[in-house]
Structures are given as structure tokens and as C-alpha cells.
Amino acid sequence: MIHFLLIGMSFWLSCHDYRHQEYPLWIWLVFSLLALLFAPLNLLVICFLLLAILAEIIDLRIGSGDFLYLATLSLCLSLTQILWLIQIASWAGILAFLAIRDKQKRIAFLPFLSVAYVMILLVNSWR
């Protein structure tokens, strides 16, 4: 059940991030509070929340929204799965950046994280 909720959140946030390079905090908050009903808070979630706060204070070249999204995914994924997710999304983002003609344009990273999340779920379902 939690994965369906998070896939819905991923789609919604990815659309916002792609269009505006940000998303409304209330959307993330609603989905995250619902996800907390199905999974307990853990140390990885807290670490990503702290990184999100740090990204708001210091320019880390990754938005705080990406860390908030990863915090929510950390409710149901292990550290290993999160590391794979970040690796897959990073490679996909690099390839997309190299493919665009306007190198000055910033790309939204959350859609790549979302696709990587679905890929992780598919791989885990085959096991």
C-alpha cells in the first residue's frame, strides 16, 4: 500500500519539479504524513531531513525538495536501496544533461529519482 502512495506522490511531485524546478511543500507534507501511517520514522529519514534543512541554508547544488523526497522514500527503502536509487538517478540525470543542447539550463532531478524508485521496486518484485 505504501508503495502505491509513494508512486502517486512521485508522479505529482515530478510534474511540479519538471515544470517549475520546485514543488509545493504541502504536497510533500500530506503524502509524507500518510506514509508515516504505514512505516516508522528511522535514522535515514532524519538524516535526509537534516540535509534538506542544510540545502535551504547553503547552496549544495541539489534542492532541498530532493532531500525531502528521499526522506519520504527512506520510510520504506533500505540504505542500500536508497544508494542504488541515487546512483541510477544520477547517471540518468547526467545522460539527460549531456543530451540537451542548452548547457545553461538546469534540469529537474526529482523525475530521475522517481524513475529510479520505480526501477528499484520492479527489481525487488522480481526477487
Image (cartoon, helix red, strand yellow):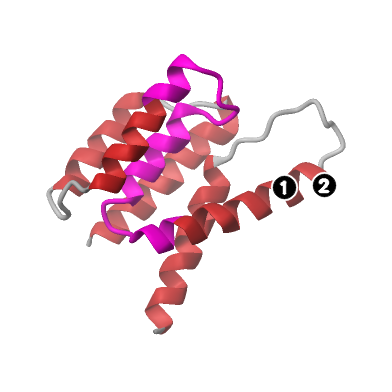
- For marks 1 and 2 on the same chain, the one whose residue lies earlier in the sequence: 1
- Give coordinates of residue 97: x percent, y percent: 76, 42
Q: Does the magenta stretch include residue 4?
A: no
Q: Main secondary structure of the magenta part?
A: helix
Q: Give the range drawn in magenta.
A: 53-82
Mark 1 lies on residue: 94
- Give coordinates of residue 16: x percent, y percent: 49, 32
Q: Is residue 124 above or below residue 15?
A: below
Secondary structure beneath dot 1 equals helix
Q: Residue furthest left?
A: 37
Judge left or right: residue 19 versus residue 105. left
Secondary structure beneath dot 2 equals helix
Towards the viewer: 18 or 103: 103
- Give coordinates of residue 84: x percent, y percent: 50, 61
Q: Residue at x 24, y 58 (%)?
A: 2
The answer to whether the residue labelled 1 contacts the one labelled 2, judged by CB atoms less than 8 Å apart, is no
Judge left or right: residue 49 versus residue 22. left
Q: Is residue 44 above or below residue 82?
A: above
Q: Is residue 94 above or below residue 33?
A: below
Q: Quadrant of the N terminus?
A: bottom left
Mark 2: few/some/many CA within 10 Å (<14, 14-19, 20+): few
Q: Residue at x 12, y 49 (%)?
A: 37
Task: Say which of marks 1 and 2 sits in front.
Answer: 1
Towards the viewer: 43 or 90: 43
Q: Does the magenta stretch include residue 54?
A: yes
Which kind of residue does numbered mark 2 sit on?
Ala
Mark 2 lies on residue: 99
Quarter of the image for residue 13 reads top left
Q: Residue at x 40, y 75 (%)?
A: 124
Q: Is residue 65 above or below residue 79?
A: above
